[in-house]
Amino acid sequence: MGCGASSASPPPAQSASPRPTPAPQDPSTRPPASEPTKDPPAAPLPQSTPASASQPPPIPASDSPPAAAAPPAAPPDPPAASAASATPPAPPPTSPPAAAPPTSPSPPPPAAPPAAARDASPPPPRPVRAGELSSTAFHQMMVFRVNGGGEEAVVQAVREETSGKMAALTGLLHAQLFTSSEGLVLHCVFNGEAARAAAAAQLSGWLGAMRETHGLSKPSTFAGRAVWSFVGIDAMREEDGVAHCRVVTLPLRAAALGEVLQFIRGAHVASVLPGIDGLMGVVLVKMSDELLATVSMYSSSAAADAALDVFSTLLEPMLAHVASPPQPYMGALRWHTGSFTRAPSLYAIGALTPKEGAVDDIVGAVRAQQGLLATQREGLLSLQLLRHGAQLLAVAGWRAAHDAAAAAAEFAGVMEAVAPHLLRPPEEQRRASSFWRCTGPASSRAVAFMRLSSSPCEPTALAQMLVGLRGAQGRAQAAAGLVWLELLLLDQAEASQLYVMELYVSEQAAEEGAPILMQLVTEAAPEGLITGALSTIAGTVVFSY
C-alpha cells in the first residue's frame, strides 16, 4: 500500500524515558523422563492527533527500503502507552491467562458451492502466523524404520525427488525430516485438517513409492491440532536455523487435558521459555483428549541437550497428569521446506488519504481483492487497515523483503481498485524490520484495535535491549486483551526509528494494556537507545487479513 500526505498539525509528542535494563532471569530448570512407548529515514511516524481532527499527520515517504535490521544475539500462537496517557503506571502482577477450552478437529469442509456462488465465497485461509497455531494448524508425524540402515539414501531421495512435490502441496505450511533412534520422522504442518485430508493421497503415493524403493517400514502415524505454541527469539532472526528436533508424545490420565492446557498456557511457562538458549520454537499438539505431543526445535543438538534439565523442572507439575512414560523421538534435522514461524520479518507501512466519506468504499475495494491477496499467501502474512481520524494506515507484514518485491504487480492491482476513492495518490511505503515479538493471551481472530508508536533510536543498543526483553513474554500476559506486541526497526543512515506495534481485541483493552506494555518496553530499553520523543497513532482496525 502507499502513503499520502496530510496537512494536520500534530500536538506536542509524548516523551518516554528509558529505564535501566533489568537483569534477565536465569531460571534453573528438567523434561519429564523419556521412556518409550510404541506408535503412536527518514522521519518518525506522526504524533497522535485527536480523533476529531480532519486529517491525521502524514508519514513521510522513503525512496528506498532500509536494510534489514540485524541486531546480534537474536535470530522462527503483533504490538506501547495510550495515546492520551503521558506516564505509564507500573504493571500489575503477572497472572496466568484463563485456560482456553480444548480444541477439536474441525469437520470436513462442505461441498464446493455452485459456480454462481463462488465469487461470494471467502478466499482460501491465510497462512498460519506465530501465535495463531491454536486455531488453524494441523500437524502430522510419521515415524519410519529403514530396512538395512539406508537412511542416507532416503534423505537424499526426499531432497531430490520429493521436496519439490511436497512444497507444491496446497495447504502445506511446513515439513521437516529428522533422524531419531526410532527411525526417520517426517513432521508436516497443514493449514487445517481439511488441507491435510486433501493432501493425504499424494503424500501416501510418494511415500509408498519410497517404501518399495528404499525398504521403508509402514509408518507409525499420529496427528492432531496445535493448541499452544511458542516461537523463540533466535527463530525470529534466523528462519533456517533449526538443526535439531524433538517430538515427545504424552499419554494423559482421563479428564486431565484441561489442567494441562491451563498450566502450559500460564505465565510461568511463558516467562521461562525465552531464557532457554537455542530454543527456536515449541508446539503442543492435541491428538485426542488423552494424548498430546510436544514438538520442539533447537539451533543445535547441544542446545537441545542443555534444555533437558530446564524442561524437566518446568514441566514437573504435569507429571501427575501423565498416564504412562512419554515417548521421545529426537535427532538432527536432515531436510525441511516452508517456515514454521509464519511470522513477518518485514512490515510495509503507508498512509492512505481517503476522499470525504470514502473510508468504507476503500475497505470494500480491498475486501473485493481478497482473492488476489490470497495468491500471495506464501509471502504476505498479514495486512491491517487502521482507521485514524480521517486517514487510513495500511500495515502489511511480509515473510521477507523479496516476497514484497515479487508481489509489486499484484499490489498495483489492489491500488488501482482503491485509487478512485483517494484524495491524492499514495506515496512510497516505509519499510521496517521486525527484531522482537511476543504473543498476548487474546485470540488473533479478534483483532479490532491497533497502536503504532515510534521514536528516533540508536540501533547499536538493540542487542542490549533484547537481553532486557527475555522475561517480557510472561509480563505481557498481564495485558488481557493483547493479541500481539512487536518491535520494529527502520534503519537508515540519516535516522533510525524504533516502532512499537500493538494489536488488541478492543479499544478498552488497548487503554488498559498500553501502560503495561510501555512500562515493559521502557524498562528493557538501555540508556541511549531511545533518542527522541515518542509519537503514537491509534485507531480501529477496519480490515484484517
Image (tube, rainbow, N blue to C red):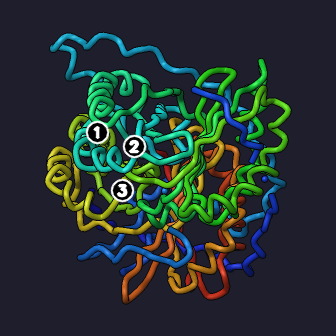
Label whose residue precedes the other's in the sequence (1 or 3): 1
Name the residue at 50% across, 40% down.
Answer: 183
Front position in the image: 170 or 406: 170
Given residues 145 and 139, the one toward you in this image is 145
**For residue 329, side relative to residue 22 (left or right):** left
Give the total of numbered labels: 3
Q: On the image, which quarter does residue 200 sit in? A: top left
- Measuring from the top left, give residue 522's x and y in whole percent: 68, 73
Which residue lies under the disc numbered 1?
166
Q: Residue at x 41, y 36 (%)?
A: 147
Tell me: residue 495, above or below residue 367.
Answer: below
Query: Label 2 to label 3, Cα distance in Å?
Result: 17 Å
Question: In this figure, which residue is indicated by the disc labeled 3?
Answer: 399
Residue carrying label 2: 175
Q: Secondary structure beneath disc 1?
A: helix
Q: Earlier in the sequence, mark 1 or mark 2?
A: 1
Name the amino acid type tagged 1.
Met
